[in-house]
Image (cartoon, rainbow, N blue to C red):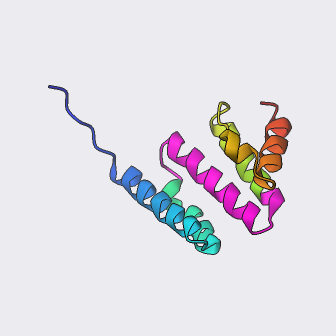
């Protein structure tokens, strides 16, 4: 029987921070989502968590009118994972869809 590996305390803290940020975003508290996503708890998390955090940060910046910061967060996600992409529905969003495409073109993915 293979041992189940549980996430490290660092990864658990990152996962909890990301979940709290997702809940804040879903409730429309974008400022709190951004504060949480700036947390040091996410710095040493796994790549998947970091990419998800940058994506959510990008969305948060876009909906608060900070499109250049949104694009920058998408660029960070793409640098971590060059295969990172948005769903078709997300690509159709009038703000973050174009910001994502600009980020992808900027870094040459």
Q: Quadrant of the N terminus?
A: top left
Q: Position of residue 75 (x, y in %)?
A: 74, 44
52 left or right of 92 in image:
left
Residue sitting at the far left: 1
The dominant secondary structure in magenta is helix
Pick the residue in front: 26 or 103.
26
Q: Position of residue 57 (x, y in %)?
A: 65, 58
User: In the rendered view, would you say 28 is above or below 41?
Assistant: below
**Which residue is painted at 28% across and 43% down in the image?**
6
**Which residue is painted at 47% across and 65% down in the image?**
20
Does the magenta run of residues contain 45? yes
Q: Position of residue 39 (x, y in %)?
A: 54, 64
User: In the rendered view, would you say 23 is above or below 91?
Assistant: below
**Which residue is painted at 45% across and 55% down in the image?**
14
Which portion, as a residue range, is magenta?
A: 43-69
Does the magenta run of residues contain 30? no
How many labels were placed on the picture? 0
Can the viewer see residue 39 in this picture? no
Residue 58 lies in quadrant = bottom right
Pick the residue in front: 34 or 11.
34
User: In the rendered view, would you say 87 is above or below 22?
Assistant: above
Residue 24 lies in quadrant = bottom right
User: In the rendered view, would you say 18 is above or below 86?
Assistant: below
Can the viewer see residue 67 in this picture? yes
Residue 63 lies in quadrant = bottom right
Q: Quadrant of the C terminus?
A: top right
51 left or right of 9 in image:
right
102 left or right of 4 in image:
right
**Which residue is painted at 64% across and 50% down in the image?**
55
Q: Position of residue 17 (x, y in %)?
A: 46, 62
Residue sitting at the far top: 1
């Amino acid at each position: 029987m293979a041992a189940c590996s549980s996430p490290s305390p660092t990864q658990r803290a990152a996962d909890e921070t990301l979940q709290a940020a997702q809940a804040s975003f879903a409730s429309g508290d974008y400022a709190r989502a951004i504060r949480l996503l700036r947390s040091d708890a996410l710095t040493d998390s796994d790549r998947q968590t970091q990419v998800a955090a940058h994506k959510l940060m990008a969305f948060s910046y876009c909906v608060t009118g900070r499109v250049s910061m949104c694009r920058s967060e998408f660029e960070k996600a793409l640098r971590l994972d060059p295969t990172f992409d948005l769903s078709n529905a997300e690509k159709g969003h009038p703000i973050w869809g174009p910001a994502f495409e600009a980020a992808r073109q900027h870094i040459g993915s």
